Image (spheres, grey):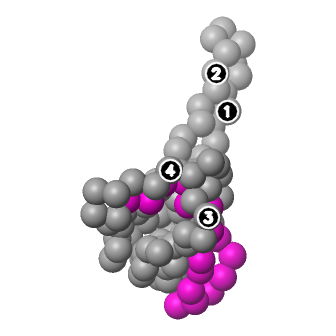
Amino acid sequence: MYAIVNIAGTQFKVAKDQYIYAPKLEGEAGSSVNFDQVLLLDRDGKVEIGAPTVKGAKVSGKILEHVKGDKVIVFKKKRRKGYTKKNGHRQQYTKVQIESIG
Protein backbone atom coordinates (compact mmCIF):
# COMPACT_ATOMS: atom_id res chain seq x y z
CA MET A 1 0.00 0.00 0.00
CA TYR A 2 1.36 3.38 -0.99
CA ALA A 3 0.18 6.87 -1.82
CA ILE A 4 1.42 9.89 -3.72
CA VAL A 5 0.99 12.99 -1.57
CA ASN A 6 1.50 16.70 -2.23
CA ILE A 7 3.43 18.18 0.70
CA ALA A 8 4.26 21.89 0.48
CA GLY A 9 4.24 21.86 -3.33
CA THR A 10 6.39 18.71 -3.65
CA GLN A 11 5.06 15.25 -4.52
CA PHE A 12 6.22 12.25 -2.47
CA LYS A 13 5.56 8.53 -2.87
CA VAL A 14 4.99 7.33 0.70
CA ALA A 15 4.39 4.00 2.42
CA LYS A 16 3.64 3.10 6.04
CA ASP A 17 6.62 3.41 8.46
CA GLN A 18 8.71 5.31 5.88
CA TYR A 19 10.82 8.38 6.64
CA ILE A 20 10.72 11.38 4.29
CA TYR A 21 12.48 14.73 4.30
CA ALA A 22 9.85 17.33 3.40
CA PRO A 23 10.37 21.08 3.11
CA LYS A 24 10.20 22.68 6.55
CA LEU A 25 6.77 22.29 8.15
CA GLU A 26 5.20 24.09 11.07
CA GLY A 27 5.10 22.15 14.33
CA GLU A 28 7.29 20.85 17.10
CA ALA A 29 9.18 17.57 17.13
CA GLY A 30 6.87 14.78 18.31
CA SER A 31 3.66 16.38 17.05
CA SER A 32 1.44 14.71 14.47
CA VAL A 33 0.63 16.12 11.05
CA ASN A 34 -2.04 15.22 8.47
CA PHE A 35 -1.73 15.53 4.70
CA ASP A 36 -5.05 15.63 2.83
CA GLN A 37 -3.78 16.29 -0.71
CA VAL A 38 -3.56 12.63 -1.75
CA LEU A 39 -3.12 12.45 -5.54
CA LEU A 40 -3.00 8.65 -5.93
CA LEU A 41 -3.81 5.78 -3.59
CA ASP A 42 -2.85 2.13 -4.13
CA ARG A 43 -4.55 -0.48 -1.94
CA ASP A 44 -3.07 -3.90 -2.78
CA GLY A 45 -3.23 -3.41 -6.54
CA LYS A 46 -6.46 -1.39 -6.58
CA VAL A 47 -5.43 2.10 -7.72
CA GLU A 48 -7.51 5.21 -7.09
CA ILE A 49 -6.49 8.29 -9.03
CA GLY A 50 -7.73 11.65 -7.86
CA ALA A 51 -9.09 14.44 -9.98
CA PRO A 52 -7.14 16.34 -8.63
CA THR A 53 -7.24 14.63 -5.19
CA VAL A 54 -8.76 11.40 -3.86
CA LYS A 55 -11.91 12.18 -1.86
CA GLY A 56 -11.75 11.27 1.82
CA ALA A 57 -8.16 10.01 1.73
CA LYS A 58 -5.52 11.33 4.08
CA VAL A 59 -2.03 10.45 5.20
CA SER A 60 -0.96 11.00 8.79
CA GLY A 61 2.59 11.29 10.03
CA LYS A 62 4.72 12.30 12.97
CA ILE A 63 7.36 15.04 12.94
CA LEU A 64 10.62 13.57 14.22
CA GLU A 65 13.02 16.50 13.89
CA HIS A 66 13.96 19.59 11.91
CA VAL A 67 17.25 19.21 10.03
CA LYS A 68 19.37 21.08 7.49
CA GLY A 69 20.38 19.72 4.11
CA ASP A 70 23.82 19.65 2.54
CA LYS A 71 25.59 22.93 1.90
CA VAL A 72 25.32 24.32 -1.62
CA ILE A 73 28.11 26.68 -2.70
CA VAL A 74 27.19 29.61 -4.96
CA PHE A 75 30.31 31.02 -6.63
CA LYS A 76 30.23 33.95 -9.06
CA LYS A 77 33.18 35.26 -11.01
CA LYS A 78 33.83 37.71 -13.82
CA ARG A 79 37.13 37.08 -15.50
CA ARG A 80 39.75 39.80 -15.76
CA LYS A 81 37.69 42.14 -13.57
CA GLY A 82 38.77 41.01 -10.10
CA TYR A 83 35.18 40.19 -9.14
CA THR A 84 34.46 37.06 -7.14
CA LYS A 85 31.61 36.34 -4.76
CA LYS A 86 31.20 33.17 -2.72
CA ASN A 87 28.01 32.34 -0.87
CA GLY A 88 26.64 29.21 0.80
CA HIS A 89 23.15 27.95 1.54
CA ARG A 90 21.66 25.10 3.61
CA GLN A 91 18.01 24.24 3.01
CA GLN A 92 15.87 23.39 6.04
CA TYR A 93 13.88 20.14 6.04
CA THR A 94 11.54 18.31 8.36
CA LYS A 95 12.00 14.57 8.95
CA VAL A 96 8.54 12.95 8.98
CA GLN A 97 7.62 9.34 9.70
CA ILE A 98 4.47 8.14 7.91
CA GLU A 99 2.15 6.44 10.40
CA SER A 100 -0.98 5.59 8.41
CA ILE A 101 -2.51 5.83 4.97
CA GLY A 102 -6.26 5.87 4.62
* Viewer-nearest residue: 53 or 6: 53
Where on the picture, by quarter, is residue 97? bottom left
Residue located 28% across and 63% down the image:
44
C-alpha span from label 4 to label 2? 48 Å
Region rendered in magenta? 25-42
C-alpha span from label 1 to label 4? 47 Å
Residue type for callout 1? Lys
Residue farthest to the left? 44
C-alpha span from label 3 to label 4? 10 Å
Where on the picture, by quarter, is residue 45? bottom left
Check disc 4 and report the residue beneath it.
Answer: 49
Residue type for callout 2? Lys
Residue type for callout 4? Ile
Residue 23 spot, x, y in % from top left: 59, 60
Residue type for callout 3? Lys
Check disc 1 and report the residue beneath it.
Answer: 85
The answer to whether 36 appears left or right of 100 in the picture is right
Residue located 64% across and 42% down the image:
87
Residue located 55% across and 69% down the image:
57
First in sequence: mark 2 or mark 3? Answer: 3
Residue 78 spot, x, y in % from top left: 67, 15
Q: In front of the other: label 3 or label 1?
A: 3
Residue 83 spot, x, y in % from top left: 70, 22
Where on the picture, by quarter, is residue 1? bottom left
Q: In front of the other: label 4 or label 2?
A: 4
Query: Do labels 2 and 1 touch, CB within 8 Å?
Result: yes
Answer few, some or many: residues within 10 Å of disc 4's Cα (few below 14, many 20 plus, some between 14 and 19): some
Residue 5 spot, x, y in % from top left: 53, 59
Query: Do labels 1 and 4 touch, CB within 8 Å?
Result: no
Check disc 2 and report the residue beneath it.
Answer: 77
C-alpha span from label 2 to label 1? 7 Å
First in sequence: mark 2 or mark 1? Answer: 2
